[in-house]
């Protein structure tokens, strides 16, 4: 029995990756939930919006690298974020102007907007692939590790190492700042409150003199920022491929639905619920268990509930369970 | 069929003729085969959307399940592998199904409360481990048998035309399960849930090597009756004499003949489907379905079981799509899991349905043939056009990039086409009457 | 006779192809209370929504303080000093009481503290519950939030669509008292009421609508005294 090593292995292989992935999902789900709350449809173009924003970040990263601009040990991509947010905002505002606004004025059914967003998805997907291609892009520079496994072992003398990648730290800090800023904005500012009011009761918001066009525009700008940040953090941590970003749609939708579509707090909680479930279910527990149980009981098999190929099945199961038993989400008191 | 339809179909026909004349007839017929398959897929989707207003994003899942049916029905039997674990795998899957059924039964028949929650959780968790205990070792033994050639459990080795209805059945069963869960929820929840189930189906086909050899691809699936093989034709003295008689090249002729047979077969299936659908549409049942689509509340008030009717049409639509998936794989002769992407097999089909005209069967056929042509012509003509367009440019990174990404232009174009149709002609090229 | 402060004159129109209102006139003087009563389906709420610009008029005009506002959107009317409390969904349930009131004052760029204090003075219970989500309040308190939100714009006219629907008689009396208090402060009140007798009691002017047209128009007291009105609309 070696509880300390078990704990370190657990932190290293489950808690840290899940927290980092959860933060990425949470930021992404915040965008989906905001758009749902204000514009009242599920945006199927979201994954490709994230891909577009990340692509712009990559292009600026390359530009800065070629100019020799660096903020080492932080990744150059962070410096590129604001530029990408501006460009992605412009894209989303433009899309709203030429595409979504028409259906909003018509008060089209949400499902029509979902289909329209699938059209937008095609356009964005094409755009991304035309500009940057379909290949994998790795754009993480800066410090590789905050704590490396080797150092950790040397300091503590434990058999198990605990590594914190630079990108993990960047993810956690950036996500935390993003979420705090967003919640401060929604709770404390006049515009933020008007967005909540609009999401809560559109007709009454209009009666109160809240300008719907402005609310919608602000929503798209915030959504752009969230898409860029979520996409970039994910890309830094793993890597960038347009195709992967499309498939992030499922865990992100699951996160937003788990928290109750339209609820920002719920989206954050949902992101972590989905990420932790995914990793707990697909992690091979053999190592951790071997440390905990007496040696003779050590398992032969990997002790893995599902192979990592099926990680989407986890998001999906959570989604289904929530839809069946808590259609308003875990954190929404019935409205 | 009105004049507008005739003109549009004639226009699309011209596209195929021009392709034949300018590129090659082989390419043109190839695209036509896939266009007909797309038309069948679009018909299935149109049943769900046009008649019932159901938006499913899991079409690729139905298509892949249909393809899987070919593997089981027509794959070469691998008796050693089956003996090693076939029955045990089936038993394991049966245990899994029984576990879920038991959990559902417990949920339905037990009184609400903590006891029920615990019972359901216990059944599901216990069932899961039991299933894994039975299933895993069997799969290991199957996959261990000659993995370079097989590693799969094998099929029945039957003619692959039998797989067509079975493919429909597979997709129908999956649609029943997902429909039971997600129909009756908000419309976009159905879209999200179907997106998920499709993703899982594709994952299973990619990673469950025991059934389809996963990404190693299962090749050598037989053609459906009565399609001959070109090599056999070329060895047939009668055929050679026929070619000599008419001054034809036996190789080209046999290739085109095989394609022609596929086209006739698929066209027959398409024709029968349309005939059935048009009849159904004008039957009391069809009128009821449209009444439900146009006003669920009043239809429900008139005593129509909306949810049940939705489930039926959802299953039927998925079955048609699944059958087309089986037709596709039986024609290809192999199952390539990597091909099944949502963009190609879900959203592209949606574009066909909407561009063609939601709710109109002929519209779906037109959309399938037109959009299918647009999509595939890029594979064949895109690099040519792009090379021509960039001919004046100096060789370099930009030029090669442009030539490389040429096929991606179609995503952009089709997305724009969809948005334009939705905006300016939301009822599509051939509107429902 | 000078124009009333707010008048919807000879209004004809409806939501779709068929007209609900036929040549219907509703008016309220400065600082007075006007009440619209009538049987179910008489077009009471529709008449009020017409005055507020929530449906297209095919005939007639709406004037506020002598100015023709027929073509203005509801939002523009809010900016001109009209406030509307819908019958249902009239609060932001997920937001706190104070945030609800702040949203009411959304158009105002000046200091809203005094207006806030006025509302708290009128409805003291709201002050004690100001950090609670409005959705957690009781029915009567929700109505207070709804009225309070409308008052935050410091309107010249307050329009209420069945403010006492679904609240207990005690709460209703209390709410009517508050409405009188609001009117005394110089705000004109136009209200639709199901509880005709109690409403006419506090009304300076009463409008009895039947099938989208004016049937009786008089002071509240006269209508209450009119035997025809009593028999047909007040249950004897």
Image (cartoon, coloured by chain):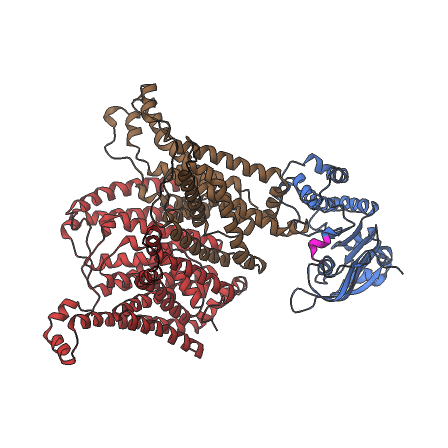
Q: How many marks?
A: 0
In the image: residue A133, left or right of residue B217: right
Percent position of residue B260, x then y = 24, 72
Q: Nearer the viewer, residue C216 or A264?
A: A264
Q: Nearer the viewer, residue B365 or B45?
A: B365
Q: Residue at x 21, y 47 (%)?
A: B88
The letter of the blue chain is C
Q: Quadrant of residue B283?
A: bottom left
Quadrant of the frame with the N terminus of chain A: top left
Q: Is residue C46 above or below residue A268?
A: below
Which lettered chain is shown in red? B
Examine the structure image and report whether residue B311 is included in the region drawn in magenta.
no
Q: Position of residue A220 (x, y in %)?
A: 54, 48
Q: What stretch of residues is rendered in magenta? A: C71-77
Can residue A294 be seen from the camera position used here?
yes
Based on the displayed image, in which of its 4 quarters is residue C122 positioned?
Answer: top right
Q: For chain A, what colour was chosen? A: brown
Residue found 73% across the figure and 41% down from its top:
C110
Query: Is A319 drawn above or below residue B13 in the view shown?
Result: above
Which one is in front, B326 or C115? C115
* Residue A214, horizontal then vertical, whole percent: 61, 49
Place residue A334 in its image quadrant: top right
Q: Name, please, the residue furthest toward the right.
A: C1
- Residue at image position (22%, 66%) is B224
Residue A30 visible in rendering: no
Q: Which residue is the extreme one toward the bottom?
A: B245
Q: Position of residue C100 (x, y in %)?
A: 66, 42
């Amino acid at each position: 029995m070696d509880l300390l090593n078990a704990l370190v292995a657990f932190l290293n292989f489950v808690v840290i990756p899940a927290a980092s992935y959860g933060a990425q999902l949470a930021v992404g789900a915040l965008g989906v939930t905001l758009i749902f709350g204000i514009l009242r449809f599920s945006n199927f173009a979201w994954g490709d919006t994230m891909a577009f924003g990340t692509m712009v970040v990559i292009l600026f990263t390359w530009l800065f690298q070629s100019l020799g601009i660096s903020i080492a040990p932080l990744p150059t991509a962070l410096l590129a974020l604001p530029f990408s947010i501006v460009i992605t905002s412009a894209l989303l505002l433009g899309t709203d102007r030429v595409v979504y606004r028409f259906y909003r004025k018509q008060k089209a059914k949400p499902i029509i907007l979902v289909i329209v967003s699938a059209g937008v998805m095609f356009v964005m997907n094409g755009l991304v692939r035309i500009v940057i291609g379909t290949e994998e892009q790795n754009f993480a520079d800066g410090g590789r590790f905050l704590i490396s496994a080797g150092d950790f072992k040397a300091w503590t003398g434990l058999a198990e190492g605990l590594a914190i990648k630079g990108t993990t730290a960047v993810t956690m800090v950036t996500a935390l700042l993003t979420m705090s800023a967003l919640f401060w904005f929604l709770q404390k500012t006049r515009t933020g409150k008007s967005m909540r009011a609009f999401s809560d009761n559109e007709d009454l918001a209009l009666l109160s003199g809240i300008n719907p066009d402005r609310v919608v525009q602000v929503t798209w700008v915030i959504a752009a920022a969230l898409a860029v940040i979520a996409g970039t953090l994910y890309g830094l941590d793993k890597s960038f491929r347009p195709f992967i970003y499309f498939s992030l749609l499922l865990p992100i939708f699951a996160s937003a639905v788990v928290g109750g579509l339209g609820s920002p707090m719920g989206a954050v909680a949902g992101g972590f619920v989905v990420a932790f479930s995914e990793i707990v279910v697909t992690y091979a527990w053999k190592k951790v268990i071997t440390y905990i149980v007496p040696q003779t009981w050590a398992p032969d098999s990997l002790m893995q509930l599902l192979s990592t190929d099926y990680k989407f099945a986890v998001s999906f199961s959570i989604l289904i369970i929530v839809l069946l038993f808590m259609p308003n989400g875990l954190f929404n008191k019935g409205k | 069929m009105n004049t507008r339809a005739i003109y549009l179909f004639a226009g699309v026909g011209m596209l195929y003729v021009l392709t034949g004349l300018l590129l090659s007839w082989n390419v043109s017929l190839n695209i036509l085969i896939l266009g007909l398959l797309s038309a069948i897929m679009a018909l299935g989707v149109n049943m769900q959307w046009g008649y019932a207003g159901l938006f499913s994003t899991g079409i690729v899942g139905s298509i892949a399940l249909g393809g899987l049916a070919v593997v089981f029905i027509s794959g070469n039997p691998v008796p050693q592998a089956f003996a090693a674990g076939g029955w045990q795998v089936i038993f394991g899957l049966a245990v899994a199904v029984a576990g879920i059924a038991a959990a559902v039964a417990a949920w339905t028949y037990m009184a609400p409360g903590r006891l029920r929650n615990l019972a359901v959780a216990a059944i599901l968790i216990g069932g899961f481990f039991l299933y894994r205990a039975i299933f895993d070792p069997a799969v290991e033994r199957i996959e261990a048998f000659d993995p370079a050639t097989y590693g799969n459990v094998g099929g029945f080795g039957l003619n692959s035309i039998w797989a067509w209805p079975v493919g429909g059945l597979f997709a129908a069963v999956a649609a029943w399960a997902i429909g039971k869960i997600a129909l009756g929820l908000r419309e976009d929840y159905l879209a999200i849930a179907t997106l998920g189930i499709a993703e899982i189906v594709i994952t299973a086909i990619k990673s469950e090597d025991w059934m389809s050899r996963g990404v190693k691809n299962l090749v050598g699936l037989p053609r459906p009756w009565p399609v001959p093989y070109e090599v056999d034709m070329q060895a047939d003295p009668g055929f050679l004499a026929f070619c000599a008689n008419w001054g034809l090249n036996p190789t080209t002729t046999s290739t085109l003949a095989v394609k022609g047979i596929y086209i006739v077969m698929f066209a027959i299936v398409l024709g029968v489907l349309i005939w059935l659908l048009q009849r159904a549409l004008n039957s009391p049942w069809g009128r009821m379905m449209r009444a439900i689509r146009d006003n669920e509340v009043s239809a429900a008030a008139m005593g129509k079981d909306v949810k049940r009717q939705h489930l039926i049409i959802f299953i039927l639509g998925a079955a048609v799509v699944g059958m087309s998936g089986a037709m596709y794989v039986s024609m290809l002769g192999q199952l390539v899991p990597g091909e099944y992407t949502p963009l190609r097999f879900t959203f592209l089909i949606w574009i066909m349905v909407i561009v063609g005209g939601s709710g109109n069967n002929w519209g779906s056929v037109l959309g399938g043939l037109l959009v299918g042509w647009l999509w595939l012509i890029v594979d064949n003509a895109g690099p040519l056009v792009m090379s021509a367009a960039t001919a004046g440019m100096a060789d370099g990174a930009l030029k090669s990039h442009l030539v490389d990404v040429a096929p991606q232009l179609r995503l952009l174009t089709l997305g724009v086409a969809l948005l334009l149709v939705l905006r300016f002609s939301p009822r599509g090229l051939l509107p429902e009457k | 006779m000078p124009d009333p402060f707010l008048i919807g004159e000879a209004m004809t129109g409806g939501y779709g192809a068929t007209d609900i209102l036929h040549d219907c006139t509703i008016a309220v003087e400065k600082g007075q209370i006007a009440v619209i009563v009538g049987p179910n389906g008489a077009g009471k709420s529709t008449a009020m929504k017409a005055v507020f610009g929530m449906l297209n008029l095919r005939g007639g005009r709406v004037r506020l303080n002598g100015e023709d506002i027929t073509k203005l959107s509801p939002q523009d009317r809010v900016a001109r000093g009209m406030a509307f409390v819908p019958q249902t969904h009239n609060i932001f349930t997920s937001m706190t009481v104070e945030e609800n009131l702040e949203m009411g004052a959304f158009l105002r760029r000046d200091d809203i503290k005094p207006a806030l204090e006025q509302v708290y003075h009128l409805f003291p219970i709201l002050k004690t519950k100001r950090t609670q989500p409005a959705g957690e309040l009781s029915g009567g308190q929700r109505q207070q939030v709804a009225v309070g939100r409308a008052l935050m714009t410091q309107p010249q006219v307050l329009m209420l669509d069945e403010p006492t629907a679904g609240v207990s008689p005690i709460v209703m009396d209390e709410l009517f008292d508050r409405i009188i208090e609001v009117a005394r402060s110089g705000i004109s009140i136009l209200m639709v009421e199901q509880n005709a007798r109690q409403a006419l009691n506090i009304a300076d002017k009463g409008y009895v609508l039947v099938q989208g047209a004016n049937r009786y128009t008089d002071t509240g007291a006269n209508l209450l005294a009119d035997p025809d009105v009593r028999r047909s609309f007040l249950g004897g």
